[in-house]
Amino acid sequence: MYRNLLLASLMLLSACTSQPPQQQSLATTEKNTTLTAPPADMAQIVFVRPSQGVLQQSDVELYRISRERIPVAPIESGSKFSLDITPGHYYFMAYQNKTANFIEANVIAGRRYFVLIDAANSKSSQLMPLSQQRYSALNYQQLPLTTTAEIEQPQWFKKNQGKVKKSQIVYWQQWQMLDSNSRKALKVSKNSGIAF
């Protein structure tokens, strides 16, 4: 009996003095960066948001504007989001820090389009057309990709819809007063997309 007690004590002592097993660091987990082609009868718009200094502290909430405001996704700084969409004419709105910015998009099936979410000023981000060449040159293909399957529509959209609606009304009126050259610079044309 003493022998068993001695063995048990030695085993317990050795367990206490041995090194704990190494835990795998979460930092080694990599997010997917690869864009996949949508079905042939769809178009794809990739919204790219590089890290933006002070502005990276707040998400950009992306909406599709039609007869109503349709939440698309919150877009974090240093990421990209792909949206598969039926061909057609669209308006998108980026809401951030009580401001709203817009972009117009004409898209056709079988093409991928890029939109840059870049700082407009110290408080908000602007949606701008982005060419495939610039997307590659700035190495945006390495940004982690968020897909619609990974997005949980947050309560934020419901909770803040009053503020968003107010900003949409104010900034939409300003956007409509832009001259034709300024509006053209904020438009994704159907021929700017690349075939996939």
Image (cartoon, rainbow, N blue to C red):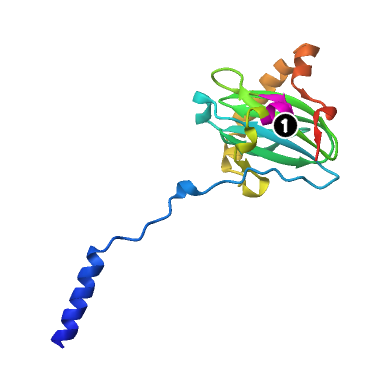
Report the residue at 46% width, 46% height from top.
27
Above or below residue 176? Residue 162 is: below
Above or below residue 145? Residue 103 is: above
In this rendering, does residue 26 appear at all?
yes
In the rendered image, residue 185 lying in the magenta stretch gets the answer: no
**Quadrant where the N terminus is found in the figure:** bottom left
User: How many residues crowd around disc 1 within 10 Å: few (fewer than 14), some, or many (20 or more)?
Assistant: many
In the rendered image, residue 135 lying in the magenta stretch gets the answer: yes
Magenta segment range?
127-136
- The residue closer to the viewer here, 133 or 145, is 133
Report the residue at 66% width, 44% height from top.
34
In this rendering, does residue 166 appear at all?
no
Report the residue at 54% width, 18% height from top.
122
**Quadrant where the C terminus is found in the figure:** top right
Instruction: Please state the horizontal and vertical placement of residue 86, each as a whole percent of the image.
Output: 82, 41
Instruction: Please state the horizontal and vertical placement of residue 56, each as a whole percent of the image.
Output: 52, 29
Instruction: Please state the horizontal and vertical placement of residue 51, each as a whole percent of the image.
Output: 55, 29
Above or below residue 87? Residue 1 is: below
Query: What amino acid is at disc 1?
Result: Phe
- The residue closer to the viewer here, 180 or 66, is 180
Instruction: Please state the horizontal and vertical placement of residue 78, each as a whole percent of the image.
Output: 56, 34
Would residue 157 appear left or right of 131 to someone viewing this image?
Answer: left
Q: Residue furthest front?
A: 137
- The residue closer to the viewer here, 35 or 116, is 35
Q: How many marks?
A: 1
Disc 1 secondary structure class: strand
Report the residue at 61% width, 39% height from top.
158
On the image, which quarter does residue 179 sit in?
Answer: top right
Would residue 182 appear left or right of 146 to someone viewing this image?
Answer: right
On the image, which quarter does residue 144 sit in?
Answer: top right
Residue at mark 1: 114
Would residue 81 appear left or right of 18 to someone viewing this image?
Answer: right
